[in-house]
Image: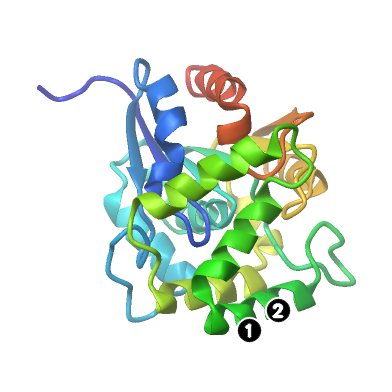
Amino acid sequence: MRSTKPILVLVHGWGMNARVFDVLAQLLADDFDVRALDLPGHGGRNSQPNNSLQGWADDLAEQVPEGSTVLGWSLGGQVVMRAALDHPGKLRRLILLASTPRFVADESWSHGVPATDLEDFGASLLADPQATLLRFLSLQTRGVPDQKSLLQQLRQHFLALPQARAEALSGGLTILRETDLRQQLTRLTQPTLVLHGALDALTPAAAGRWLAETLPNARYVELARAAHAPHLSHSADVAAAIGGFAHD
């Protein structure tokens, strides 16, 4: 029998896979038809010939039923924003979790990480992909109470499915380094929930506040003791915020 629940699609971030949403999906299962997807080249999926933001956004739009609410975490949020700009009828509501219009800081954008940090990740990725990804996981939990336990959860999800393919990791890193959606976001009119951790070291909370102020139809929720993975560290709070937003 076809589900009558509203569809909620979950899109993970760089180097991860759909299993990172296991806890959140369980909390939301009573109210939503939850579908956690793997990006191309992640979680055992084949890569695309062109692992670009546009390619991944088009791939997402092909999988999303029309009228869905779609959550994107971190890099996944950029994929969701691109898909929503290009396929507005498919994505009815958006949830941007620890995401940003631009990861890299420069003279015009102070709410990001130094470009040299991503360059270092690129060099390390060639030398030792798994160690680089595990280092990236540790950055996602920096500053959070009970960091050790949260990092263990992330590592378990990371190892639950096949590691992302090298070409997808490299393509994702290029997306992180080059994407800048700031000038286009005033066209993104779908109702949007921006969820951010105040302690986020990868996508600072100021980036989330900027999103909420710039998007035409957005609300902002900040979790005071969360970092880059609020869906793991504060699962119940994130689920409650999603439920309130999606049923408005």
Query: Is residue 71 depicted above or below 103 in this figure?
Result: above
Residue 49: percent from the left, percent from the top?
33, 81
Taking the spot 34% from the left edge, 57% from the top edge, the residue there is 43
Residue 189: percent from the left, percent from the top?
57, 43
Tell me if I can see residue 181 in this picture.
Answer: yes
Query: Horizontally, is 144 left or right of 149 in the view?
Result: right
**Dot 1, crowdedness within 10 Å: few (<14), some or many (≥20)?**
few
Identify which residue, 159 or 56, lies in the foreground. 159
Q: Give, as a three-letter code, the residue at label 2.
A: Asp
Q: Are marks 1 and 2 in contact (CB under 8 Å)?
A: yes
Query: Horizontally, is 147 left or right of 210 in the view?
Result: left
Q: Give, as a three-letter code, the residue at label 1.
A: Ala
Query: Is residue 76 depicted above or below 232 in this figure?
Result: below
* Quadrant of the snapshot with the N terminus: top left
Residue 138: percent from the left, percent from the top?
66, 53
Dividing the picture into quadrants, the one containing residue 32 is top left
Q: Which residue is mark 1?
A: 123
Label tally: 2
